[in-house]
Image: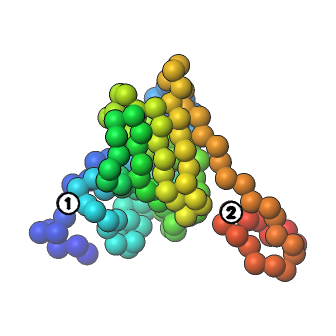
Amino acid sequence: PIPMAELVQLPFAQVDAFSSKPFSGNPAAVVGMGQFQAYLPDSILQAIAAENNLSETAFWLEDSGGNEDEFTGRLRWFTPTLEIDLCGHATIATAHVVFSSRPSARRALFKTMSGTLEVVRGMDGRYEMALPSWRLPAAGSAAGPGAVLLA
């Protein structure tokens, strides 16, 4: 357990991605690490994700030197039991939180274990994101991030 003196408050949002209606879409928790220069220990991030008990909890950290029109930061995703390499709906949810606090921002770049992901807010307010792709490895070879081995 964490001693009470070490507890901190973190900005938290639960966002329903792919929907404009509450309690629909694909929910994800979004937690900002704004007051820190680095992520909390993995064991703490995992415990927060387990407590949220959603399919994914996204943890984001802003890089210094950004501007009002573009956000640049880092992003990690945890399920209630493990860290994962990629999560589309939690990335969209995180971009929504970022864009909500930066009305003039049109682009968010997130450095992740799967590479840099870009989310763009269109003039109509909709978000667009291109997901990375990987080739399936030959049977018996080493798999890359997100690869699926077929037997």
Badge 1 amino acid: Val
Is disc 1 placed on a helix, strand or loop?
Answer: loop
Q: Position of residue 144 (x, y in %)?
A: 70, 70
In the picture shown, does residue 146 fall above or below 28?
Answer: below
Say which amino acid is labelled 2: Gly
**Which of 70 and 132 lies nearest the eye of the viewer?**
70
128 to the left or right of 35 = right
Q: Position of residue 115 (x, y in %)?
A: 58, 59
| Residue at the (76%, 78%) spot, across then down | 142
Residue, x 55% and y 44% (percent of image)?
A: 118
Q: The C terminus lies in which quarter of the figure?
A: bottom right
Q: Is residue 24 visible?
A: no
Q: Which residue is mark 2?
A: 146
Whichever of callouts 1 and 2 sits on the residue coming sooner in the sequence is: 1
17 to 149, vertically: above or below: above
Q: Crowding at label 2, few (<14), some or many (≥20) Cα neighbours within 10 Å? A: some
Left or right, 84 with reference to 93:
right
Q: Do we see residue 91 in this rendering?
A: yes
Name the image quarter holding residue 1: bottom left
**Mark number for residue 8?**
1
Tell me: 103 left or right of 78: left
